[in-house]
Every structure is written in structure tokens, then in C-alpha cells.
Image (cartoon, grey):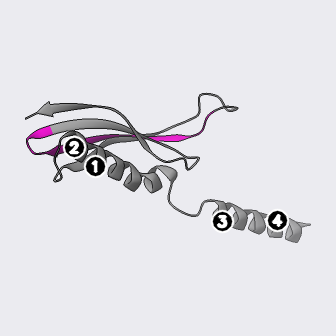
Amino acid sequence: MTKALSTLAAALTLVMAGCASGPPFIDAAQPEALAMAQRRAQFEMNCPDATVTVLSRETLQPVSFRFGVVRAEYTIGAAGCGKRATYVVMCPQDGSGCFAAGGRTEIQ
């Protein structure tokens, strides 16, 4: 019986390791979030040289376990051509793509 339990434990360990492969969702979605914010900043600031930086990020759980999806939320700062802006970019884990919520632009 001990050998059977050892085999079962080893099999479960392998299965769990397979499920944990790849980077965490928040890391995997960050490049798309940065690209989204940069395109929006370049357009809104009329500045093709605008650069972006992640100011904060967090993983948001669904409102209810029955409805909604896990989302990564990034606050991204943009600067260029004498202007600065911040954007909140949301990336649902369901693969529907990132979107930038309202931003705030300042003239430096």
C-alpha cells in the first residue's frame, strides 16, 4: 500500500507541475498592456516618441465566482513631447484583449 501511495503522490506532483507551467497571467499580459497604453498616448498626445512605464499592477478576481473573469489591471504612465498622462489598462484573462480606460493628460 505504501508503494501505491508513493506512486499516486508522484503522479499528482507531475500533474500539478504541468498545470503551473508558463508565467503568471499578470506577467504574460503586461507587454500587451504597455503596447495599448503607448499607442493611446502617441495618439492622444500627438507624440510618436511617447514612452510608457508601469506604475502599478494587480490581479483582480471576478465579482462573483459564477460571473466574470480574472483581470490584470495596470496603471501606466506615459511621457513625451512635453506632456504626461496616466492610463488604466485592463486585460481580461479570457483572451478578449486589453483595453485602456480613461486617461489623464498633463502639460509639463
From the image, tell me which residue sits under label 2. 78
Which mark is first along the chain, 2 or 4? Answer: 4
Q: Could you tell me if the residues under marks 1 and 2 are in contact, i.e. CB atoms within 8 Å?
A: yes
Which mark is first along the chain, 2 or 1? Answer: 1
Foreground disc of the pair 3, 4: 3
What amino acid type should be assigned to the residue bearing mark 3?
Gly
From the image, tell me which residue sits under label 4. 8
* Residue 45 lies in the magenta stretch: no
Residue at horizontal 30%, vertical 42%?
Answer: 76
From the image, tell me which residue sits under label 1. 38
Q: Is residue 90 left or right of residue 68?
A: left
Residue range of the region highlighted in magenta in the rendering:
68-83
Distance Cα–Cα, label 3 vs label 1: 34 Å
From the image, tell me which residue sits under label 3. 18
Does the magenta stretch mainly form a helix, a strand or a loop?
Answer: strand
Which mark is first along the chain, 1 or 4? Answer: 4
Q: Is residue 83 left or right of residue 61?
A: left
Secondary structure under the numbered disc 4 in the rendered image: helix
User: Which class describes the residues within 10 Å of circle 3: few (<14), some (14-19), or many (20+)?
Assistant: few
Q: Position of residue 47 (x, y in %)?
A: 16, 47
Residue at horizontal 55%, vertical 50%?
Answer: 95
Q: Position of residue 3 (x, y in %)?
A: 86, 71
57 vs 11, nearest the viewer:
57
> Splitting the image into 4 quarters, where does residue 105 fall?
top left
Tally the numbered discs: 4
User: Which class describes the residues within 10 Å of circle 2: few (<14), some (14-19), or many (20+)?
Assistant: many
Secondary structure under the numbered disc 1 in the rendered image: helix
45 vs 8, nearest the viewer:
45
